[in-house]
Image: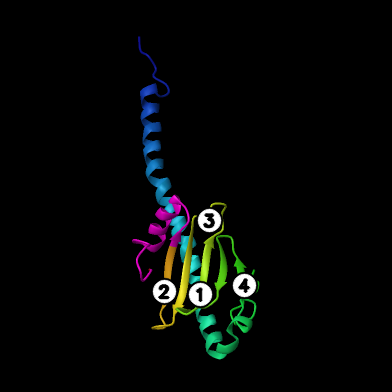
């Protein structure tokens, strides 16, 4: 008598589920890192546009910088721009006033409930360079800063 074997055995199904679980455990963290890098790339691209616009405005209106060089007055037309703040899906951007060390700055804070990290860029008075740093606000933010900066986020010169 011949038995017709139909379907899969329990062992075969368990092996398939195990393989899918292993692939998922490897793939999901890599996917999340890629998403965070994309968000940070969006922030850095916007930071470049704003940095250039603020530099032009600063050169033009040094004595009236804080009054004339708000986000709504810049040449770069950015949707969602208020005078001191821009809100996007990923970040809330705040214009930072200058001080004795820096001409001006920008702060990109993650637009989620935990505000895991922020990217701060400032134009240094001593040599005119624009320095970016990733500032973690939570424990998860420390890891995300490593992902965003591509190396240790706490370096003096930023990334």
Q: Position of residue 102 (x, y in %)?
A: 46, 78
List x then y, in percent, for residue 148: 41, 61
Residue 111 horizontal side relative to residue 41, left or right: right
Q: Earlier in the sequence, mark 4 or mark 2?
A: 4
Alpha-carbon neighbours of circle 2 within 10 Å: few (<14), some, or many (≥20)?
A: some
Residue at horizontal 53 percent and vertical 76 percent from the top: 50
Image side of residue 54 versus residue 10, left or right: right
Q: Earlier in the sequence, mark 1 or mark 4?
A: 4
Circle 4 packing at 10 Å, graded few (<14), some (14-19), many (20+), is some
State yes or no: residue 77 in magenta: no
Mark number for residue 124?
none
Q: CA distance from mark 3 to mark 4?
A: 19 Å
Looking at the rendering, the stretch of residues picked out in magenta corresponds to: 135-158
| Marks 2/3: CA–CA distance | 21 Å
Mark 1 is surrounded, within 10 Å at the Cα level, by few (under 14), some (14 to 19) or many (20 or more) other residues, namely many
Is-magenta flag for residue 156? Answer: yes
Pointer 4: what residue?
Answer: 84
| Residue located beneath label 3 in the image | 115
Label at residue 131: 2
User: Label 1 belongs to which residue?
Assistant: 105
Q: Quadrant of the C terminus?
A: bottom left
Location of residue 58 by image quarter: bottom right
Residue depicted at x 43% and y 63%: 134
123 relative to 153, above or below: below
| Label 3: few (<14), some (14–19) or many (≥20) C-alpha neighbours in 10 Å | some
């Amino acid at each position: 008598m011949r038995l017709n074997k139909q379907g899969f055995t329990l062992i075969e199904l368990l092996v398939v589920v195990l393989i899918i679980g292993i692939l998922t455990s490897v793939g999901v963290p890599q996917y999340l890192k890629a998403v965070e890098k994309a968000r940070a790339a969006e922030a850095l691209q916007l930071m470049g546009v704003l940095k250039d616009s603020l530099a032009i405005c600063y050169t033009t209106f040094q004595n009236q910088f804080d009054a004339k060089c708000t986000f709504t007055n810049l040449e770069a037309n950015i949707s969602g721009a208020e005078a001191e703040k821009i809100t996007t899906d990923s970040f809330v951007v705040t214009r930072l006033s200058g001080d004795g060390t820096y001409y001006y700055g920008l702060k990109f804070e993650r637009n989620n409930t935990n505000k895991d990290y922020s990217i701060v860029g400032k134009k240094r008075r001593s040599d005119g360079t624009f320095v970016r740093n990733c500032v973690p606000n939570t424990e998860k933010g420390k890891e995300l800063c490593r992902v965003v900066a591509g190396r240790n986020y706490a370096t003096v010169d930023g990334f």
